[in-house]
Image (cartoon, helix red, strand yellow):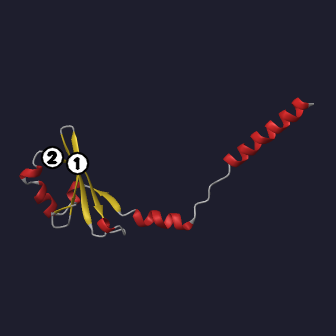
Amino acid sequence: MKTKVIFFLAFFTLASFSAIAQSPVAVTETEVIAMDAQDSRVEITADQLPEAVHKTLKTDAYKDWTISKAYHVKGAGEKDMQKEHYEVVLKSNDRETTVKFDKDGNVIE
């Protein structure tokens, strides 16, 4: 009799955990809004970079680097992201770095 009770309790506990694991998780509207506010970084082609950025990239400081990826970043609320800028991922041999430029080709921190 004890084994039947223990078996029944174990089965009931396992069934309860299975039901909880299958419950969908609700996403609230505030979470979606927060994600949209941070989604201001758009990948662009190197040709879409401003001419001033291309001019800076042709200087001696970047002559050994090639553009791997480029992003156009618009202000999203954080202090360092409030200004529109461009992020350029540069590669040289086995090294990679990301440099931020304003629309005038100036390097920004």
Left or right: 93, with 38 as reference point: left
* Residue 74 seen in this snapshot: no
Q: Which residue in the rendered view is the most extreme toward the right?
A: 1
Identity, as a three-letter code, of the amino acid under mark 2: Trp
Residue 69 in the image: state x and y as whole percent: 26, 51
Question: Which residue shows up at 28% across the image and 61% down it?
Answer: 72
Quadrant for residue 50, please give it: bottom left
Question: Which residue shows up at 53% across the image and 67% down it?
Answer: 30
Quadrant for residue 52, please give it: bottom left
Per the image, the residue denoted by label 1 is: 97
Residue 95 in the image: state x and y as whole percent: 21, 41
Residue 10 in the image: state x and y as whole percent: 79, 36
Q: CA distance from mark 1 to mark 2?
A: 9 Å
* Residue 108 seen in this snapshot: yes
- In terms of depth relative to the viewer, which is nearer, 7 or 26? 7
Q: Which residue in the rendered view is the most extreme toward the left?
A: 60
Q: Quadrant of the C terminus?
A: bottom left
71 over 67 or under it: above or below = below
Question: Which residue shows up at 27% across the image and 68% down it?
Answer: 84
Is mark 1 in CB contact (under 8 Å) with mark 2?
yes
7 over 100 or under it: above or below = above
